[in-house]
Image: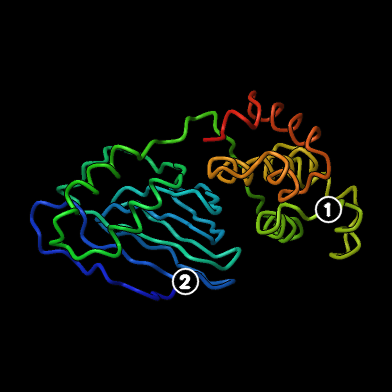
Amino acid sequence: MRTEDDRYPRSDNPVSPILCIDRDTARDDEVLHLHAHPEPMLTWSSTATLRGTVAHRDWLIPPGYGLWVPGGIEHSGSVLHAGEMLTITFSPDRCPITWAEPTCFTVGSLLGEIITHLHRIAPDDRSRPGAEALMLQLLTPLPAHHIHVRMPADPRIRVIAERLIARPADQRELAVWADQIHASVRTLSRLFRAETGLSFITWRTHVRIRAAVPMLAEGTSVNATARAVGYRKPSAFIAAFRRVTGQTPGTYLP
């Protein structure tokens, strides 16, 4: 990922736990190779769709989501859909976030504005301590039962999975995908179930519902969200949302 703008340089302020805040432009198909560093970090995707591999597990980071990576843990990443992202690096010995494992979280409008503000201001700005404190208060880990989308490894269905994550409204059924990648529907169906634990239809539904959550949290109407993630009828979207989350889409509206 190329750093487009880094107005918040590495800080010499001994009080702040933040070392630096980098805003990057993530380009299609970019790859971050496996590495580790002692500094823990938060990565927030504002408009990009990212995939991270942390502690031997794949994590999807669509727009509106973030991922916490503790210090010392090997991780790598790639860009599934270009866009903007922001990374906050913390001091290993002063970090107030105590999450011991990689953790996903959502970034609503208020938290997003605070992070953007921290990126814009100087390290010695008078508003910085209060903004940092509020940011930490708003960071909430997603519960363990939150929608988890498992990524397949087999290249025949991996390409399908990555395209659907980047564009969840894609209406192509498995028969169409089978023609395009020169494999049988039966083979693709078997691979999806073996590698994700779900049928193709159910896996795609999870992708769509997960993409819908940050949109709803930002105040997008249920009807508009339904259309954006591939549902022509809001009633079908509401039914699918309830099956996956146990709640109605309105629960996630601000």
The mark nearer the N terminus, 1 or 2, is 2
Q: Amino acid at mark 1?
A: Gln
**Residue beneath the point at 35% across and 58% down:** 116
**Residue beneath the point at 48% across and 58% down:** 46
Residues 58 and 203: in front is 203
Label 2 environment density (alpha carbons within 10 Å; few <14, some 14–19, many ≥20): some
As drawn, is 59 to the left or to the right of 243? left
Badges 1 and 2: C-beta atoms under 8 Å apart?
no
As drawn, is 43 to the left or to the right of 175? left
Q: Position of residue 60 (x, y in %)?
A: 55, 50
Is 69 drawn above or below residue 235 in the view shown? below
Which corner quadrant of the image does residue 217 belong to? Answer: top right
Q: Amino acid at mark 2?
A: Thr
How much space separates mark 1 and mark 2, taking CA atoms? 28 Å
Q: Position of residue 209 (x, y in %)?
A: 67, 40
Is 158 drawn above or below residue 236 in the view shown? below
Image disc number at residue 25? 2
Element class at badge 1: loop
The residue that label 1 is drawn on is: 171
Residue found at the very far left of the displayed protein: 14
Q: How many marks?
A: 2
Element class at badge 2: strand
